[in-house]
Image: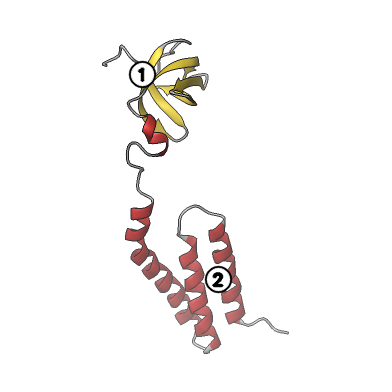
Amino acid sequence: MDIQGWMIWFIIAAIFIIAEIFTAGFFIFWFGIGAAAAGVLGILHVSVGWQWLAFGGVSFLLFLISRPFAKRITKDQPEGIGANRAVGQNGIVLEPVDNNKNTGRVRIGKDEWRANSESDDVIPKGTKVTVSRVDGTHLIVKRQNQGG
């Protein structure tokens, strides 16, 4: 059995769609749809050049159309939701915060967090701190007597 060009497009489409399941965001899926469109053109015996144009054009067009939606659902969390709820809260250092050694744990309320120092200085255990912002999985903290 000879493998046809349209079969290759549909295999590529399946790979892109399955890969989308394992990635964050909603980007690879559109390449899968574009490959499927090229596969349909392959079934209709349209030239390979038009198949590639359909693949690129459909993928790009769907990406542009979906971009505003993706921005809306992936925007930063408003303060008070998720880890951002800790911003502005006071806590205490449980493990010295040392950015150079990548150490630091703080307690904010009943929760313990990994922490980095806002000013890069070492903050000793027992120091009262305030959360300035969240950076990934770390709270960025400053001593309470530093500017408030």
Q: How would you rate the neighbour count of disc 1 (Cα within 10 Å): few for under 14, some for 14-19, many for 20 or more?
A: many
The residue that appears at 26% across and 16% down in the rendered structure is: 147
Q: Which of disc 2 and disc 1 is earlier in sequence?
A: 2
Q: Quadrant of residue 118?
A: top left
The amino acid at mark 1 is Lys
* Residue furthest to the front: 110
Q: How would you rate the neighbour count of disc 2 (Cα within 10 Å): few for under 14, some for 14-19, many for 20 or more?
A: many
| Left or right: 74 in relation to 46 | left
Does residue 44 sit above or below 84 in this rendering?
A: below
Foreground pick, 97 / 28: 97
Q: Quadrant of residue 81?
A: top left
The residue that appears at 43% across and 16% down in the rendered structure is: 92
- Name the spot of residue 142 as percent of width and height, x first: 36, 18
Q: Verify CB contact (< 8 Å) between mark 1 and mark 2.
A: no
- Name the spot of residue 6 as percent of width and height, x first: 58, 81
Q: Quadrant of the C terminus?
A: top left
The residue that appears at 39% across and 13% down in the rendered structure is: 128
Residue linked to disc 2: 13
In terms of secondary structure, where does tag 1 sit?
strand
Residues under labels 1 and 2: Cα distance? Answer: 50 Å
Residue linked to disc 1: 142
Q: Quadrant of the N terminus?
A: bottom right
